[in-house]
Amino acid sequence: MAAANRKKIVVVGLGMVGISFIEKLLKLDARAREYDVVVIGEEPHLAYNRVGLTSFFEHRKVESLYLNPQEWYSAVPNGALNYHLNTKVLDIHPAKKSVTCANGQEVTYDILVLATGSDAVLPRHTPGHDAKGVFVYRTIDDLERLIAFSAHQKGTVGAVVGGGLLGLEAAKAMTDLACYDKVTVIERNRWVLSRQLDADAGGMVVEQVRELGVEVLLGKRVGRIDVDGEGQVTGVHFEDGEYMSCSTVCFAIGVRPRDELARRSGIKCADRGGGIIVDDGLATSEPDVYAIGECASWQGQTFGLIAPGVEMADVLSFNLTQAKLHQPRLYKRPDLSTKLKLLGVEVASFGDFFADRDGPKYLPERAKRQQQQRKPDAMKTLTNGLPPAPVKALAYKDPFQNVYKKYIFTMDGKYLLGGMMIGDTKDYVKLVPLVKNQKELDVPPSELILGAKKDGADEGDDLDDDTQICSCHNVTKGDVVSVVKDGTCKSIGDVKSCTKAGTGCGGCVPLVTAIFNKTMKDMGNEVKNNLCPHFNYSRADLYNIIMVKRLKTLPEVMKDAGVEPDSLGCEVCKPTVGSIFASLWNKHVMDRTTHGLQDTNDRFLGNIQRNGTYSVIPRVSAGEITPEKLIVIGKVAKQYNLYTKITGGQRIDMFGAKKQDLLDIWRTLVDAGMESGHAYAKSLRTVKSCVGTTWCRYGIGDSVGMAVRLEERYKSIRSPHKIKGGVSGCVRECAEAQNKDFGLIASEKGFNIFVGGNGGAKPKHSEVIPIIDRYLMFYIRTADKLQRTARWLEALPGGIKYLREVVLEDKLGICASLEAQMQELVDSFFDEWAEAIKSPAIAAKFAQFANTAETVENMEVELDRDQTRPVMWAKDSAKEDFKGLRERWSETSWQPVLEAAYFEGADKAPNGVSAAIKRGDTQLAVWRVRGRYFATQQMCPHKRAFVLSDGLVGEEAAAADAAEGASSCSSHPSGAKAPWVSCPYHKRNFDLANGDCKNDEELSIATFEVEERADGLVYVKLPPVEELDAALGTKKWMVKKGEAGPSQLAELDKKISFKGIRAKKPGVRPHTELPMRRPVQLMAAAGGGGCGSAPEW
């Protein structure tokens, strides 16, 4: 639909329900494009997972909670979605069809959707409710304030008022903060979770929560909160007269629908309980205004769970986009079933779980008829009282395993109405559809409650397609199966992204994974975790094979474990095998037998940058450095004109070092006592530290000393991905240790260890090293290729609990082996750069060209904040037909370019031997691989980078060839299939014989005939130099200033009048008062209250 004819939908509220509605609407409207959406969010964050809010205490990164990354919003088709953050809507004008925001902006709408959610209840009638130290538990802002406050409450008691779902979540969060001596839950009822569980089940949860170290007070109501002279919480008085001292009170006693915006605007709201009144189509009392989620009141009910809100989003998005062709959908009785893990306790309730106490809300037709037949007459009711509820409850309790189940059935036992579960909740997903669909049971109630297992049950075989497997986002088994079968989703990540299953509370992930794997298997797509087509093994399997068989070269590995014994491998398996070799045998990565396995950065012991230069980063253990070493770094940077920057890992990066200068630079640094920082390697990067007891008045532990010891111990050890550590000297967490692959936080009793962003153990100082040894070695042995520790930990069966059992309790009996292997690696340490400087064979590799000492610049540079840096990349790739040059040259002749001796040993090297050649102004790349020569242009056309000679060489696996019926590789004149070279920048793979790009059909490269002759020289068939330079010259293709267009920050610079680093402004006196006239004048002109009226909160 044309943009001018589209309707505008304005959504107020960017929470879980708001974003769910937007996602569904955009998906259903993708083809018709009837609507443009504008969403206005009051919080400064994009839509985040409020159900997973407690995990924020572990990683402290709001981005980790985002339901969609920021890129998702910008990737939506142009105009289809616009969003405003940190913007509060103050008024709705139904007559004008517009809303007014707090910033004065007025936004018009054709359709308005209110998804304003709810607020946490704070009992304002309770004296002291506004004291310092009183919090609610609802938003990221609430959590950040609680975290900041708790850091100063060491040795005190933290209290949580409310023992419901939210209260137990808050108690877990406060416990995980490790700031309080004790956390106490205060519940007014006789058991916790009284809205979901009966007394028996709630009592069992109380016992388990107490066993975890959290105190639970039952039957207690807070009468008032005591404060000191500074308004700080000191304790709480209960209504029964008892007193408890505490420093912090977190209220989690329920939520209240946010209907104030609607009320102000004359939209009808419920008097009792609040909420915006909606009909079955979710329309409010005003035309074209709808309400969904926790702010909506449907049939006198509001719902504080995510699932009913997502269901509302489903109904409304369908009706707005599909109602012209289909019968409009009506919102029906929502499913209020919940399944959660609270303080380590599995809890679930489903269906009409209080039917035995309150009577059934809904009965199947057959049971309803039976009930009417048994209905007593009015006289008997007056005489004998009300009859018992027409249901029967069956309970099972196992105090040894902490399992409790109660299922409620109709009187004849034929229908399940609801129930609750503690400890064992695995049947939850199967029972919910039995209740929802009012399906007659085919087994007796006793068999149902004992959980008789059927074949295939673990894979979801016994579930119908309409079974809801993700209640947070209303995803059925059929939804998952469908997107796998139609090819939309080929991984669990795809399924999560497409269906949203598993992105709420995460409890359904195991079942979703099982259904995905089973569906793939049924389609004949065996779910494998193979490294690449050249190996039928995962990285972990291959690691064990190489370790046990003591394999030390790529040919040995291919012969013992590869699909083809003589294969070259590819850009995926070569670096993995090289990394495994380094993790096991610790040979220099630039050794002849291993250099050809190294990926982009390890190849020359430095991170390659946009213009083909490298970074130089000496190790600065724990960020501690002497003035003498700082001076040397400064001299090197100045001599070689290197761009310098302080890193987040507390060391100094120097950028822009040319390959041919690296040896001299590092010789200077090594002579000054410095060594490689391994910033280029998949290994330990840094162990960040705060200053700790070395200087800080708050320090409890020697964080610098511990960080130095850890970094010195684990430096240079290769792993599946980079590793970063952190050590904080106290709970203020200045080193951000909890966000690292491993982190330590000092306490009075020792250090708390955190791994993969999760809590691990709390050992004494002397026990730290063995634990981290075991953890890192277990990770190195078992992780997948390029898998960070956090993802590895998520994938471990049993997660952090299993890791504790392996590392702390030696469940597998391998702790001694892990420690011994780590000690061997630690003892074999050598500095890679110091060895490279001493080795003539390695040093010879650091030249720009193999046939001349001349050097050229590969990209223009520009001055930015007094330092030079490469210009920005051009917007577009070079899409010329380079491949076709071979047919377009006016003439060609054989030209000698290099001595054949340069390629000595190439046939046994894992990547052959390559050379960069300068011919006129043109750069060429020449390879010898397995007895064959290849020659191409040196420039990768993707980013116009002159780097192809440094790429990894690969070839198709035999299995891949057979699957396609014929090889996709071209043939060499020898008749053998030609390999490809993978650009070291962005892995564009180019056929070395015909120049085709295998993973980007718009790109190609020029290729040339090449041969070795009896005179000991290598010849390449080339056109005249002038013609060659006109087509491929460096000056023609190097990226120049201005090709990228305006600066990325040009609009911002214009808005804030940015001129560069601010210097002292002449005439400004630092001790003179500012006039502050203009701000006051503007405030008065805007009608603001200034200082004379209270702000409108």
Image (cartoon, grey):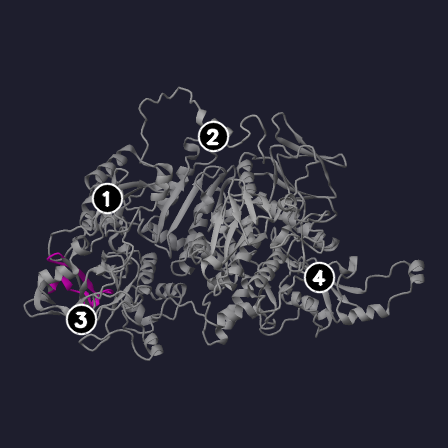
At horizontal 70% and vertical 57% (from top left) the residue drawn is 399
Q: Name the image quarter holding residue 387.
A: bottom right
Can I make out residue 177 in this image?
no
Calculate the distance from the C-alpha at mark 1 to the C-alpha at mark 4: 69 Å
- Is there a contact, CB below 8 Å, between mark 3 and mark 1? no
Can I make out residue 467 in this image?
yes
Q: Which residue is mark 1?
A: 862
Calculate the distance from the C-alpha at mark 2 to the C-alpha at mark 1: 41 Å
Q: Secondary structure at mark 2?
A: helix
Q: Marks 3 and 1: which is nearer the front? A: 1
Q: Which residues are magenta?
A: 900-921
Calculate the distance from the C-alpha at mark 4 to the C-alpha at mark 3: 72 Å
Amino acid type of the residue tagged 2 in the rendering:
Leu
Q: Residue 1082, which numbered label?
A: 2
At horizontal 61% and vertical 45% (from top left) the residue drawn is 170
Q: Earlier in the sequence, mark 2 or mark 1?
A: 1
Q: Earlier in the sequence, mark 3 or mark 1?
A: 1
In front of the other: 5 or 420: 5
Q: Which residue is mark 4?
A: 419
Q: Which residue is mark 3?
A: 932
- Is there a contact, CB below 8 Å, between mark 4 and mark 3? no
